[in-house]
Image: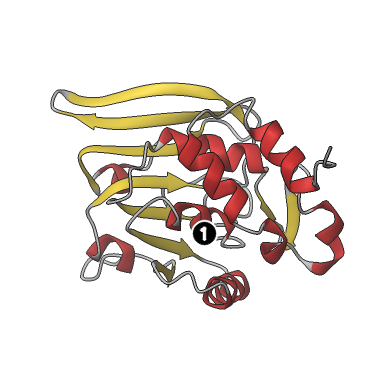
Amino acid sequence: MNTPTPLDRLIDAIAHEVRDARVLAAMRAVPRAEFVPAPFLDDAYIDTPLPIGEGQTISQPTVVAVMTEALALRGDERVLEIGTGSGYQAAVLARLAREVVTVELIPTLRERAAATLARLAIDNVRVLAADAPTPDAPPAHATLGPYDAIIVTAAAPRVPPSLLALLTPGGRLVAPIGPRSDQRLVLITRTAHGLDERDLGGVRFVPLRGPEGYADGPPTR
């Protein structure tokens, strides 16, 4: 009998929360160790968040999988990610969607993520700087919309209206929303009758930066 590898054990843990076979296959295929800083490589396949520098983390794999499953991707979608971080979430999305646009404020993280994705030959992800909007120039990611799915990997006090405006009919948005200490993961679907919202459970994310993020404390995305 073969001894389970750390990756096997991780996928088994994720499978307790996620049933979508395509998502599980993507989680198995994307090498998380490539997105983890060297001091934490021994923990790359443990189901826990890990530091990646600049006060940021690579999310817990189960949370990555739950958020990905909520988007119900089938392969032909254009997806927007707010908060590239390590690039791990974008790499998972890239295996499930036609195109991923991912946005990161912190230059060191953005450059490192782009280099990692290039090294792994993941060529359907576009990594952008988080441009500040002006009256004459919307953010670059907005000019590339609309999107079939949007994922936000930083918490906000409410669902950002600017992102809802980028959703196609039938599009889905998943994001952590609520007070800093008590966020809920929500799934918003644009239907013919308006916006449908589902609560997917409690989470804890770093705060979103900008006018649609938290007003108090140092913003991080």
Quarter of the image holding residue 149? top left
Q: Nearer the viewer, residue 220 or 127?
A: 127
* Residue for point 30% across, 42% down: 161
Q: In the displayed structure, does residue 126 sit left or right of residue 195? A: right
Residue 212 place in picture, x, y as percent:
42, 47
Q: Compared to 20, does 163 lie above or below?
A: below
Q: Is residue 5 above or below residue 90?
A: above
* Residue 67 image offset from top left, x and y in percent: 50, 38
| Name of the residue lying farthest toward the front | 1
Amino acid type, mark 1? Ala
Quadrant position of residue 116: bottom right
In the picture of the structure, the residue carrying the numbered disc 1 is 91
- Quadrant in the picture for the C terminus: bottom right
Picture coordinates of residue 156, whole percent (x, y): 49, 40
Instruction: From the top left corner, tell me how far across and down residue 215 is, in percent.
Output: 52, 46
Q: Residues within 10 Å of mark 1 (few under 14, many from 20)?
A: many
Name the residue rendered at 67%, 53% in the picture. 58
In the rendered image of this protein, does residue 221 appear above or below residue 19?
below
Q: Please, what secondary structure does the residue beneath circle 1 have?
A: helix
| Image-quadrant location for residue 173 | top left
Q: Quadrant of the N terminus?
A: top right
**Can I make out residue 36 in this image?**
yes
Q: Residue at x 33, y 43 (%)?
A: 74
